[in-house]
């Protein structure tokens, strides 16, 4: 019984996370300013990372968790670089 509840809850979480990616994708494509696009990308990578984590929980393999870690690290670095570029106009000093 608990295995079935876990399976259904993971399926519902994956569907909800997939739907949650529509809003930030719209903001990235149609954002009026660059700051809106950065916030949309930030939300998109966090939601994508959570979606990969739910795939990892569902399949039970470690590979998805490592991929989620890489997505989180690259997303953080890219958000910091984009924020610095928007503030100063350059990334590398």
Image: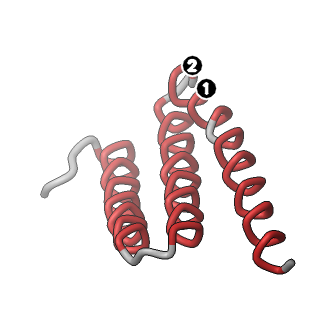
Tell whether label 2 touches label 1 (CB within 8 Å). yes
Residue in the picture at 50% in, 34% down: 37
Residue in the picture at 42% in, 66% down: 68
Report the residue marked by disc 2: 30
Q: Position of residue 62 (x, y in %)?
A: 39, 77
Query: Residue 2's image quarter?
Result: bottom right
Q: Position of residue 86 (x, y in %)?
A: 37, 42
Q: Is residue 49 above or below residue 31?
A: below
Label 1, residues with CA under 10 Å away: few <14, some 14-19, many ≥20: few
What's the coloring here? Answer: secondary structure
Residue in the picture at 52% in, 52% down: 48
Q: Secondary structure at mark 2?
A: helix
The circle drawn on residue 26 is: 1
In this rendered view, identify the residue nearer to me: 37 or 22.
Answer: 22
In-image side of 44 versus 80 (left or right) = right
Quarter that holds the N terminus: bottom right
Q: Is residue 8 above or below residue 26?
A: below
In-image side of 21 versus 42 (left or right) = right
Quarter that holds the C terminus: bottom left
């Amino acid at each position: 019984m608990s295995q079935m509840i876990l399976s259904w809850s993971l399926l519902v979480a994956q569907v909800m996370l997939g739907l949650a990616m529509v809003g930030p994708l719209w903001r990235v494509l149609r954002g009026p300013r660059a700051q809106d696009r950065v916030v949309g990308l930030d939300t998109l990578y966090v939601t994508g990372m959570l979606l990969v984590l739910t795939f990892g929980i569902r399949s039970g393999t470690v590979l998805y968790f490592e991929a989620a870690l890489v997505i989180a690290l690259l997303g953080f670095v890219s958000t910091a670089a984009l924020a610095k570029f928007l503030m100063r106009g350059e990334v590398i000093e």
